[in-house]
C-alpha cells in the first residue's frame, strides 16, 4: 500500500520509549539470530527505526502499536534498551 500525498502529511518522526509500545500478532514467527542483532546495538545503535502507530486509548497503558520492526523490537528488549 502506498500512502497518498495527503496521508503523508499526517506522518511524524519522533523518539518513543519502547516501554510504551504494544506488540500484537506478528506475521514473522522466526526472528533468526536476534542475539547477534542485539549485540550490534552497542556499537552501531539502531540504524533502522521501528514504525508505530499512536493508539487513541489502551487499557494496559500502551500508547503505540508496533507496525514494522518486530525483530528490532525483540533485539532491543534482549539488549535491555528500554526507556
Image (cartoon, rainbow, N blue to C red):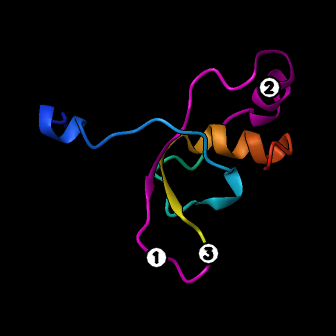
* Mark 1 vs mark 2: in front: 1
Q: Residues within 10 Å of mark 3 (few under 14, many from 20)?
A: few
Position of residue 78 relative to residue 59, above or below, is above
Asked whether 17 or 23 is in front, the reply is: 17
Residue named by callout 2: 41
Q: Is residue 31 visible?
A: no
Q: Which residue lies at the image location 79% right of the left edge and 49% below the top edge?
A: 82
**Mark sitting on residue 42:** none
Q: Are marks 1 and 3 in contact (CB under 8 Å)?
A: no
**Residue 81 placed where, x, y %?**
81, 42
Position of residue 9 relative to residue 23, above or below, is above
**Residue 17 placed where, x, y %?**
68, 50
**Residue 71 placed where, x, y %?**
62, 40
**Residue 70 placed where, x, y %?**
58, 45
Q: Which residue lies at the image location 61% right of the left edge and 79% below the top edge?
A: 60
Q: Is residue 19 magenta?
A: no
**Mark sitting on residue 57:** 1
* Mark 3 vs mark 2: in front: 3
Residue named by callout 3: 61
Magenta span of residues? 31-60
Kindly give the residue lying farthest to the bottom in the view shown. Answer: 59
Whether residue 77 sits left or right of residue 1 in the image: it is right
Q: Which residue lies at the image location 74% right of the left edge and 32% below the top edge?
A: 33
User: Circle 1 — which element?
Assistant: loop
Q: Which residue lies at the image location 19% right of the left edge and 36% below the top edge?
A: 3
Q: How many marks?
A: 3
Amino acid at each position: 500500500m502506498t500512502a497518498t500525498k495527503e496521508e503523508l502529511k499526517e506522518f511524524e518522526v519522533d523518539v518513543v520509549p519502547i516501554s510504551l509500545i504494544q506488540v500484537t500478532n506478528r506475521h514473522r514467527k522466526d526472528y533468526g539470530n536476534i542475539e547477534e542483532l542485539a549485540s550490534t546495538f552497542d556499537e552501531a545503535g539502531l540504524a533502522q527505526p521501528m514504525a508505530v502507530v499512536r493508539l487513541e486509548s489502551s487499557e494496559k497503558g500502551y500508547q503505540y502499536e508496533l507496525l514494522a520492526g518486530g525483530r528490532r523490537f525483540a533485539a532491543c528488549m534482549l539488549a535491555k534498551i528500554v526507556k
